[in-house]
Image: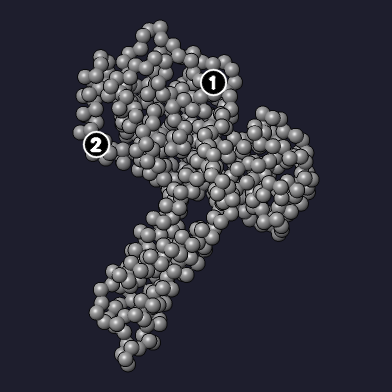
């Protein structure tokens, strides 16, 4: 909740966010594995280990006094089948910032398919393996397959979750990740360097920049310039780079193509920033016209039936949620009323879809401000958090720490002003300022504002960079799906369990 005091708007251009983050000094024994060169073998080994334990638990679960060793022996085929199915779902390919939630559905599907394949193999082979002249009938193949499936549906995701948590910890604390070279110069190169430094979860560490035109020190930050593109092979060998990112550059396309071919011959992954990056989303696909690749841009229509369904579903869920939490809602309202003079709700004008202004509701968490109170917005940051003097009430501090002050926005969702998931709305006076200074800021208003969003679950809450928020919000809009909304809601619950100030 923001203050109603007078706002002093900075006139200077919004600054780029800092890329410096706290990184612990890694022990000497960690350095050789810091590049994550063993990521795929370790992942395969952990999946095999999880599959073996799943079969063992299923065997222990089966209670049979009759000899069933042949069925149990054949059931071990589940282990290699699972690894093959996981590989076909691209779960052993390295992707940037793929989280456990992204893996959960394909992993569970792979487990189910592998259990079904195991059942098929057992059914085909067991009747042909008599014991003492009689066919084994003491344990049905379906009993074994179902137990393996149930055990693996818990064990395999649990092991992958543990691996994901450990990997994220190492990336954040000791800067684990593959060394990456960047070809290019200009703002996109700077943006790549900033994102790698800010979000170590991507698993990339910039180790050098190459381009025929030397980037400025402000663009490079702390990343060394390694010369022209002609030095690529030597730079790749010297830095041990495992990734190459080709950003917009003045280098001719023929030279970039040769450089990418050299990188592939050295076993280096090549990623290319498309020239029309603002219209490329997760639904984009590649087709070929003869030998010419064509990038097909499938767009998301914010005014289409999919978003109409999203809004209707959101209003229904919000209405049910208000009824379910009504005792909590009424209790908080009473405590707010008793905490200090003033209304229960704090209604503040915010800008929503298509620039329409609406009153965004929150539980009042602050005492009224003095008439002459002012505050100055941090350079490059969005408004929010505690602005000016701290006037929070005792219950207000608790509500803001736990985000309970946001609950009345469920009423905004029911009324149709907002939706459950979307860009967070901003005040009209700041929207006008940000549209002048922040690239693509106004495009956030293509969709309804949300109680939570892609920016918020990535830590962009309170007085954080508005340029970063615009980037993350536009990513959400262009890659929207109901599955992404569900993921954001789950991450919001986790974020609420880690209280932060908003």
Q: Quadrant of residue 448?
A: top left
For image coordinates 44% across by 69% down, the residue present is 79
> Is disc 1 placed on a helix, strand or loop?
loop
Give the left or right position of residue 252, taking residue 198 as reference: right
Of labels 2 and 1, earlier in sequence is: 2
Q: Quadrant of the N terminus?
A: top left
Q: Bin the neighbour count of mark 2 within 10 Å (Cα to Cα): few under 14, some 14-19, many 20 and up.
A: few
Q: Bin the neighbour count of mark 1 within 10 Å (Cα to Cα): few under 14, some 14-19, many 20 and up.
A: some
Q: Vertically, is 439 above or below 477? A: above
Estimate the x, y position of residue 461 in percent, counting from the top left.
44, 30
For image coordinates 41% across by 24% down, the residue present is 385
For image coordinates 20% across by 33% down, the residue present is 327
Give the left or right position of residue 475, taking residue 269 as reference: left
| Rendering colour mode | one colour
Q: Quadrant of residue 494?
A: top left
Evaluate whether residue 427 shows in this view: yes
- Real-space CA distance between mark 2 and mark 1, rounded to the nearest whole angstrom: 39 Å
List the residue tagged with mark 2.
325
Estimate the x, y position of residue 338 in percent, counting from the top left.
21, 19
Give the left or right position of residue 285, taking residue 448 as reference: right
List the residue tagged with mark 1.
379
Q: Nearer the viewer, residue 32 or 354?
A: 32
Estimate the x, y position of residue 134 in percent, counting from the top left.
31, 90
How many numbered dots are placed on residues in this image?
2
Extreme bottom residue here?
133
Q: Nearer the viewer, residue 217 or 106?
A: 217
Extreme front residue here?
28
> Is disc 2 placed on a helix, strand or loop?
loop
Q: Quadrant of the C terminus?
A: top left
Evaluate whether residue 475 shows in this view: no
Estimate the x, y position of residue 229 in percent, counting from the top left.
76, 44
């Amino acid at each position: 909740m923001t203050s109603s005091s007078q706002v002093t708007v900075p006139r200077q251009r919004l600054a780029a966010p800092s890329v410096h983050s706290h990184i612990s000094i890694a022990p000497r024994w960690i350095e050789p594995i810091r590049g994550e060169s063993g990521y795929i073998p370790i992942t395969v080994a952990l999946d095999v280990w999880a599959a073996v334990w799943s079969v063992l638990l299923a065997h222990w679960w089966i209670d049979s006094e009759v000899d069933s060793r042949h069925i149990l022996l054949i059931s071990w085929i589940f282990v290699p089948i699972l690894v093959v199915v996981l590989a076909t779902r691209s779960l052993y390919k390295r992707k940037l910032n793929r989280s456990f939630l992204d893996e959960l559905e394909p992993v569970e599907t792979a487990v189910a398919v592998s259990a079904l394949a195991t059942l098929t193999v057992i059914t085909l082979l067991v009747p042909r393996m008599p014991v003492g002249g009689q066919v084994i009938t003491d344990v049905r193949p379906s009993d074994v397959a179902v137990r393996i499936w149930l055990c693996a549906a818990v064990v395999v995701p649990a092991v992958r979750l543990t691996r994901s948590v450990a990997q994220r910890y190492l990336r954040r604390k000791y800067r684990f990740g593959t060394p990456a070279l960047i070809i290019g110069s200009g703002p996109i190169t700077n943006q790549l360097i900033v994102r790698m430094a800010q979000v170590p979860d991507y698993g990339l560490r910039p180790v050098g920049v190459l381009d025929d035109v030397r980037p400025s020190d402000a663009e490079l930050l702390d990343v060394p310039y390694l010369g022209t593109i002609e030095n690529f092979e030597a730079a790749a060998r010297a830095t041990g780079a495992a990734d190459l990112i080709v950003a917009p550059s003045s280098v001719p396309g023929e030279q970039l193509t040769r450089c990418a071919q050299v990188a592939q011959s050295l076993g280096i992954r090549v990623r290319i920033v498309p020239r029309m990056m603002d219209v490329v989303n997760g639904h984009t696909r590649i087709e070929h016209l003869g030998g010419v690749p064509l990038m097909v841009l499938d767009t998301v229509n914010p005014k289409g039936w999919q978003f109409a369904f999203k809004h209707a579903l959101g209003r229904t869920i919000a209405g049910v949620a208000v009824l379910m939490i009504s005792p909590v809602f009424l209790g908080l309202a009473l405590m707010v009323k008793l905490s200090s003079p003033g209304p229960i709700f704090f209604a503040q004008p915010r800008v929503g879809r298509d620039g329409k202004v609406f009153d965004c509701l929150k539980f009042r968490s602050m005492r009224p401000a003095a008439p002459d109170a002012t505050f100055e917005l941090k350079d490059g940051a969005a408004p929010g958090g505690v602005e000016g003097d701290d006037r929070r009430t005792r219950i207000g501090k608790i509500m803001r720490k736990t985000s309970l002050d946001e609950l009345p926005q469920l009423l905004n969702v029911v009324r149709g002003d907002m939706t459950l998931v979307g860009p967070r709305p901003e005040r009209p006076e700041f929207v006008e300022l940000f549209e002048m200074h922040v690239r693509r800021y106004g495009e956030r208003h293509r969709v309804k504002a949300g109680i939570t969003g892609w920016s918020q679950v990535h830590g962009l809450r309170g007085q954080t960079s508005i340029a970063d928020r615009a980037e993350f919000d536009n990513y959400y809009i262009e890659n929207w799906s109901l599955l992404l909304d569900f993921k954001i809601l789950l991450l919001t619950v986790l974020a609420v369990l880690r209280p932060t100030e908003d």
